[in-house]
Image (cartoon, rainbow, N blue to C red):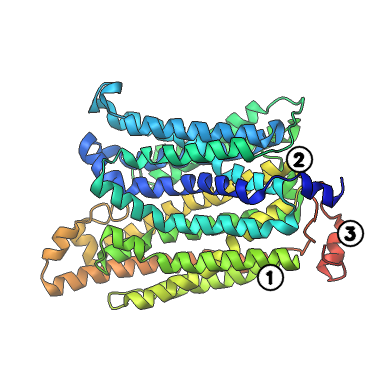
Amino acid sequence: MTQAAQAAARPNVRVVLFGLMIAMMLAMLDNMIVSTALPRIVDEFRGLDHFTWVVTAYVLGTTVSTPIWGKLGDLYGRKSVFLTSVVIFLIGSALCGMAGSDLFGGPGDGMAELIAFRAAQGLGAGGLMVGVMAIIGDLVPPRERGRYQGMIAGIMAIAMVAGPLVGGFITDHLSWRWAFYVNLPLGGVALVLLVATLHLPKHRTEHRIDWLGAALLAVGITAIVLITTWGGNEYDWASPQILGLAGLALVTLVAFGFVERRAAEPILPLRLFANRNFALISVIGFLLGFAMFGAMNFLPLYQQTVQGASATNSGLLLLPLMFGMLVVSLVVGRAITKTGRYRAYPIVGGVMMTLGMALLTLLDVGTSRIQSSLYMVVLGVGMGFLMQTSMLIAQNSVTQKDLGAASGAATFFRSIGGSFGISLFGAIFANRLADSPAGGSFGGGSGEAGAGMDLTKLRELPAQARELVLGGFADAISHVFWWAVLFTVAVPVLAWFIREIPLRTANDAPPATPEEQAETALGKAPVA
């Protein structure tokens, strides 16, 4: 089929993109909206001991299901698989909103019900994120893809800030249950729009699903997420529980590797990692998730404790970060579409992200909101260079039949990196805080980062004591960013070794041969 015929057969991308953006917004917003509603949920269900599982169950469901959704889309066609994930997400949302209601026997088991329903909701969310990226890959060739993926990256940036704002409004003016019910009308609009406008080629292979590989991967990922969630919080790192989970993760993932080598249609094809660009961008994605999700959790904590912002205002104070990420994502996406060049962007992004993290190490009691906003702009610029280019490089490294698996793997490594980052940085923060006046005053030496914090008690302290405590908080938070720098500095180094493979101008074109890759690396191959 000629390029002109392909373009004519292609659906209206802008119309479809609107539905995809709503779906991506749902997946990104949900966790951030729910986090602001957690205090009300805990108060109603008296479930303080297990409230972290409301977040963990969602993360676990999302992470476990992401590569599976990606492969199912490759096998059975992306439209039906993606719409199924939307339906599962909406059913999970409705059930979460009804948890602990009279329909399920009252609030007695409300927390357990909510955790179970959040896991189901997370299973659907995994399909939303990987499905959006893979469908864009189906609709437009790599050369044109940067512009649309830049828009999606912008939506992710908006969601990071809008989540706390919407969650704060819902929590203050409506029941916490609307933190889940709000997904239903938005998801319904996306579902109707995509059913009517999304037309993708239907295909189905005769291969059997790699259920054994999927089960081993799910067990291994679950063990890893539990290690990062419980380690240093529920159990000591050297406890039998954590060591047992580490052993389980090691055994199941090694077995997964053996199974994938022999499966006809592996869930996560290991041959993809033989491609240099794909292997490099997977590691970069892990480091990006590690530093970004891990360290960014501490910005609202700094704003609310040290700078005295309210929960809602702390969301507004993240606007500079969103602005930097949004503008750069859109500009870079259009630049890639125009020039076909992309290798420089992850390098520049890694440098800018490292610079942003380094600037955030300067946060202290005397840092003004203008200064911290400028630091966040730099970090957002770095993230804007990296977010969509990492997915674009991953997709351009594989053939069309592996597009879903590649998109799932890229999303998966970023999610796993975020899980590790949140856990490690939380432990670093708690340990640093324990040795400070803040730790002595608020019991920051154990449990979750900041779990023992009482802002009312903090405000009642004498001025001199309050300054000491705030100094301890600021020092512990800046210490986290120092650790983040150690990880982000590896991003531009790894990105330097990415080869500038010409972006394909048609989806059915094969990736460049090793000889073409070598010529491109030497600057001899023309840009597609």
- Residue linked to disc 2: 401
- Residue linked to disc 3: 515
Q: Nearer the viewer, mark 3 or mark 1?
A: 1
Number of residues whose C-alpha sits closer than 10 Å to that of mark 2, classed few (under 14), some (14–19) or many (20 or more) = some
Residue 494 visible to an observer of this rendering: no
- Residue linked to disc 1: 344
* Three-letter residue code for mark 1: Ala
Number of residues whose C-alpha sits closer than 10 Å to that of mark 1, classed few (under 14), some (14–19) or many (20 or more) = some
Q: Give the quadrant of the N terminus.
A: top right
Residue located at (20% from left, 61% from top): 440
Quarter assignment of residue 57:
top left
Helix, strand, or loop for circle 3? helix
* Three-letter residue code for mark 2: Lys
Left/right placement of residue 147 relative to residue 223 reads right
Q: Position of residue 140 (x, y in %)?
A: 72, 51
**C-alpha span from label 3 to label 2:** 22 Å
Q: Position of residue 291 (x, y in %)?
A: 49, 60
Residue 146 visible to an observer of this rendering: yes
Q: Position of residue 354 (x, y in %)?
A: 52, 70
* Three-letter residue code for mark 3: Glu
Q: How many marks?
A: 3
Which callout, 3 or 1, points at the residue further toward the start of the chain? Answer: 1
Residue located at (41% from left, 58% from top): 161
Determine whether 455 is above or below 172 in the image. below
**C-alpha span from label 1 to label 2:** 28 Å
Left/right placement of residue 449 relative to residue 61 reads left
Residue located at (48% from left, 35% from top): 89
